[in-house]
Image (cartoon, coloured by chain):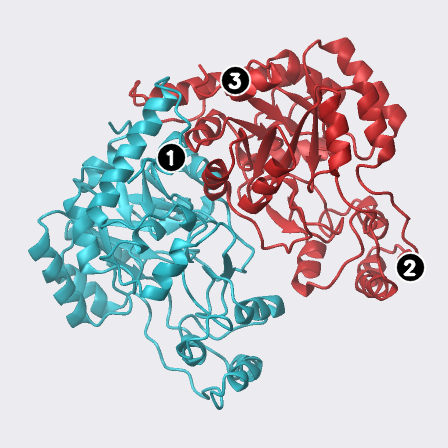
Chain colours: A cyan, B red
């Protein structure tokens, strides 16, 4: 049924649907269920120890004999100058005070680069079928080593220029991530909260600019979205938010409840929590921080200042629940059932476009 | 060829493609050429005198016997308190100084509401087939009068909640305007520059929320985009930026040149020029104003302060060139040729989706 089979052939998968790696929310259970249902399951490994990655890969290999994708962030070791830290501490102190959290931490952790030598060696040892990157690509030597090991590589572009850079760097496919997407935007540089090209404009312009297969991401919530992405020239899609409601995802009960009542305007793009912009549910803290638009501590070092605020559990003050603008389309279904439904809905949408019965194009009942 | 013919039947048009009214850029020549080619031509009448609207309608009726659309803004008479004016003047003075423009004006014009009694009477006299609104809808009496005169009404929603409000108010169709769209965002309230739902997420959620036909807008640049909008459940599309390159549009030579080299990241959403957010080409003035996020004078009153800055012709300082994120897909073609090409491209995209030859889905040569 797929009019473009490039991703199916490249990845040896049945359906060109990639489950987004969603560090902290995707699980080996989720990824392997997606793989077994014919999609590409992914696991965000950035925050995991090498032992945990090894164990997760082993768990996935026990659960499926199909290819899967391990995901890493690509960035230099974050740095924060003392003046920026002092400014951020001063801005956060009133929020700490309001929640009785005491003084804002005075020190930030020293963090390694995102995709470092240890993670490279781990991937060369584990040899997953696919490794995907966020925030750019590692250096040419690392890319050559991974490709030499037969690993397929993909990375994210949020602009046409970034897509060209990914093609030049030797990626095998490109994720075109639009404004609608939940979670961290994969921009290759640190951007502001109002920068972002919508999926509708981004995908065809990336398709025209590169020869590689393009995986559309951002705002795709059901089979109508998959059919639309293919119409724009994408070879397939990456969907994250849709899988957050699956029982296999590490989504807590409060977030599942939020997803059930989610709407199109719940979220905003904010760098207030991690130091880089991500689409997350609105909260007064994020809105105040974004209004000020002052320099922030380095990516992920910022978590040392915001984690205590989030740990207070006061969503009415600060929350970092990451999901996209199409969360209102989510369904509570196990991953295999969701993937089956997405494929059926896509078939219905494609048939309708080709002059089949002029249905109202509404959602199928699950 | 159209799988959804609701707009064709509602408007008595051949192709469900609406040319956006684009006040100041659309012309009677452009609109009537689109009508004659089988689409819905539109003219933004907000800044025109009643005599000018009458003359334009007469010109269109001489050029085409097909239905056309006249567009108006809907907002209360703008108000600016003295403190806000003082703040805006202080912020603009350095920019005036840099360009040698003297003091920032001290007074703002008194402006009428957008769709006032005079404009209502004019529409009831002229009876265009369609009247469209931006920024909401007029009151129930005006709507009843227009509908009683046999005029079809459409308005713009930028969120699902706005779409529901438009349906409840009695509109005949709803434009779902995504983040990608050029020009003023049609939000029913004054919003910030980082608010906006992408077309990909907005359209299916609006389609699910209302019974009316939905016209997708924002980021649609060619037939791939039209096919994608239909896949998402839209009954048709509204395209503005694509028509700015037509010789019939009132686009000056400098802007035509910019459109020829446009890319996906040229634009930003800013309220710095008019007092309400619009997608326009980036400029240092807009970026500085948006960083500050301070209250601005009322909608369009703000032009009294920014027009002298724009009249200086220094695009490297301040420019208010309105276009969308898909401007990179523009083609220099007369309106009739563009509409024909869009229909052909849509047919190709639809055929490809239904298992036709697996083309690369790239643009047809014009």
Residue A338's quadrant in the figure? Answer: top left
Q: Which SS class for mark 2?
A: loop
- First of labels 2, 3 by sequence position: 2
| Disc 2 residue crowd, few under 14, some 14–19, many 20+, Cα 10 Å | few
Q: Position of residue B57 (x, y in %)?
A: 79, 18
**Which one is in front, B18 or A110?**
B18
As drawn, which residue projects farthest toward the bottom?
A: A102
Task: In the rendered view, tell whether residue B328 sits above or below residue A311.
Answer: above
Q: Quadrant of the N terminus of chain B?
A: top left
Q: Which SS class for mark 1?
A: helix
Residue drawn where x is 36% and y is 36% of the image: A363
**Which one is in front, B276 or A151?**
B276
Question: Disc 3 and disc 1: Cα gap in Å?
Answer: 24 Å
Residue drawn where x is 43% and y is 56% of the image: A185
Q: Which SS class for mark 3?
A: helix
Q: Chain of mark 2?
A: B
- Can residue A263 be seen at all in this image of the molecule? yes
Q: Position of residue A318 (x, y in %)?
A: 48, 72
Same subunit under labels 2 and 1? no
In the drawing, what numbered circle is on residue B103? 2
In the drawing, what numbered circle is on residue A224? 1
As drawn, is B334 to the left or to the right of A198? right
- Can residue B265 be seen at all in this image of the molecule? no
As drawn, is A151 to the left or to the right of B229? left
Question: Disc 2 and disc 1: Cα gap in Å?
Answer: 54 Å
Mark 3 highlights which residue? B341
- Figure disc tally: 3
Q: Chain of mark 1?
A: A
């Amino acid at each position: 049924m797929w009019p473009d089979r490039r991703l199916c052939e490249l990845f040896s998968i049945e359906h060109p649907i990639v489950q987004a790696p969603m560090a902290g929310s995707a699980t080996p259970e989720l990824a392997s269920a997606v793989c077994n249902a014919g999609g590409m399951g992914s696991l965000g490994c950035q925050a995991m120890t090498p032992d945990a990655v090894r164990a997760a890969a082993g768990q996935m290999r026990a659960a499926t004999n199909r290819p899967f994708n391990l995901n890493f962030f690509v960035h230099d070791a974050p740095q924060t100058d003392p003046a920026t830290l002092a400014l951020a501490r001063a801005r956060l102190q009133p929020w700490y005070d309001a929640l009785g959290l005491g003084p804002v931490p005075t020190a930030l952790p020293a963090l390694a680069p995102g995709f470092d030598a240890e993670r490279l060696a781990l991937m060369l040892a584990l040899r997953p079928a696919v490794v995907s990157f966020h925030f750019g690509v590692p250096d040419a030597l690392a890319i050559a080593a991974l490709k030499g090991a037969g690993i397929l590589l993909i990375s994210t572009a949020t602009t046409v220029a970034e897509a060209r850079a990914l093609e030049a760097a030797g990626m095998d496919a490109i994720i075109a991530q639009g404004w609608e997407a939940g979670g961290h935007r994969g921009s290759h540089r640190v951007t502001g909260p109002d920068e972002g090209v919508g999926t509708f404009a981004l995908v065809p312009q990336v398709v025209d600019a590169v020869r590689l297969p393009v995986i559309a991401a951002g705002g795709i919530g059901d089979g109508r979205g998959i059919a639309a992405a293919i119409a724009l020239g994408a070879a397939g899609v990456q969907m994250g938010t849709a899988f957050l409601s699956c029982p296999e995802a590490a989504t807590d009960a409060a977030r599942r409840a939020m997803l059930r009542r989610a709407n199109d305007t719940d979220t905003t793009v904010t760098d207030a929590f991690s130091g880089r912009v991500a689409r997350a549910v609105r909260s007064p803290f994020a809105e105040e921080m974004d209004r000020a638009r002052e320099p922030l501590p380095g990516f992920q070092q910022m978590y040392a200042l915001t984690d205590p605020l989030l740990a207070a559990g006061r969503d009415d003050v600060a929350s970092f629940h990451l999901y996209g603008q199409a969360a209102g389309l989510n369904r509570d279904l196990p991953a295999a059932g969701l993937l089956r439904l997405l494929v059926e809905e896509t078939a219905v949408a494609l048939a309708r476009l080709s002059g089949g019965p002029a249905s109202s194009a509404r959602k199928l009942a699950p």
